[in-house]
Image: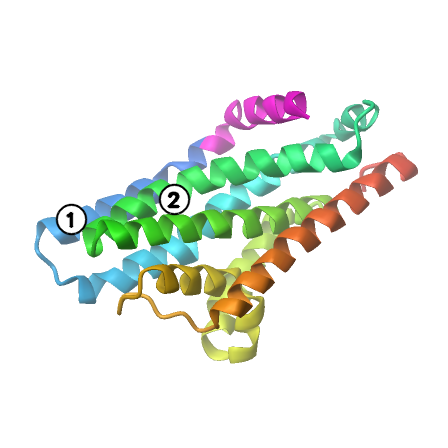
Amino acid sequence: MSTVAWITARGLFGRRRVLLLLPLPMLLVGLAWLCRAYDVDPAEWGAPVLIGLGLAVLLPIVSLIVGTGVLGSEVDDGTIVHILTKPLPRRDIIMAKLGVAVVVAAATAAIPLFVAGWLAHSPALGGALAAAAVVGAFAYSALFVLMSLLTRRPVLLGLVYILVWEGLLGRFVSGSRVLSIQQYVITIADKITPTTLLDGKVSLPVAVVMGAIFVLGCAVASVDRLRSFSVAGETS
């Protein structure tokens, strides 16, 4: 399992795709620093930067890039067959891949969110955003790893979920928020450090329970899907 994780991390950081992880964190911290440097009232820029850019764009996009990258490329080029021939339980393969995705996505999103939250309000808010980002990284990564096993266009499907389901329907259709990872993350951060800059639309029990369902459900489904690859002997 550790060997699979090491190979996955080396392959992920060896691709140009990893360069896509840098612009959004830099933009988030840069905007927060500029607003703080020019004494702009956090009430005016806090929500658009922290939620609109940080939790609604940075966290899911980074998780999408990483989550679809740890396994999707191997499915596309057929090298997944070589992994399946190893005497490893399919569960261990998925856990190793998912573990790498969560660590990379969480670190890439949590650190700049901590800095931006500190600049906007306080270290406590920064810590709340970072903690919520870690939870979100688990849920998003599990979802996007599963998508990479279900379709050859996981990035497109992931963008539909982020932009249409969370971005569009989440604003105007209240029922869709129950299945929105973004709303779970906002609620968790708001409950850890209550502030007017954050406004969760779902209750904390819903955020915790549904977040756990996303992680466990997608992980179990990914293991089951990977087993079907070995049975069918193909990657489609």
- Residues 31 and 7: in front is 7
What residue is at 83 percent from the left and 23 percent from the top?
A: 87
The secondary element bearing badge 1 is classed as helix
Reading the image, the residue beneath label 1 is 34
Reading the image, the residue beneath label 2 is 110
- Residues 130 and 163: in front is 130
Disc nearer the start of the sequence (2/1)? 1
Image coords of residue 30 (percent x, y): 23, 44
Q: Please tell me whether the stretch drawn in magenta is mainly helix, strand or loop.
A: helix
Q: The disc labelled 1 sits on which kind of residue?
A: Leu
Image coords of residue 27 (percent x, y): 29, 45
Taking the image as shown, residue 110 lies to the left or right of residue 153, namely left
Taking the image as shown, residue 31 lies to the left or right of residue 152, namely left
Image coords of residue 219 (percent x, y): 69, 47
Q: Is residue 1 above or below residue 175?
A: above
Local packing at callout 2 (Cα closer than 10 Å; few below 14, some 14-19, many 20+) is many
Q: Is residue 4 magenta?
A: yes
What is the quadrant of the N terminus in the image?
A: top right
Region of the chain picked out in magenta, as a range = 1-18
Q: Is residue 96 magenta?
A: no
Q: Is residue 131 visible?
A: yes
Taking the image as shown, residue 62 lies to the left or right of residue 150, namely left
- Residues 92 and 63: in front is 92
Local packing at callout 1 (Cα closer than 10 Å; few below 14, some 14-19, many 20+) is few
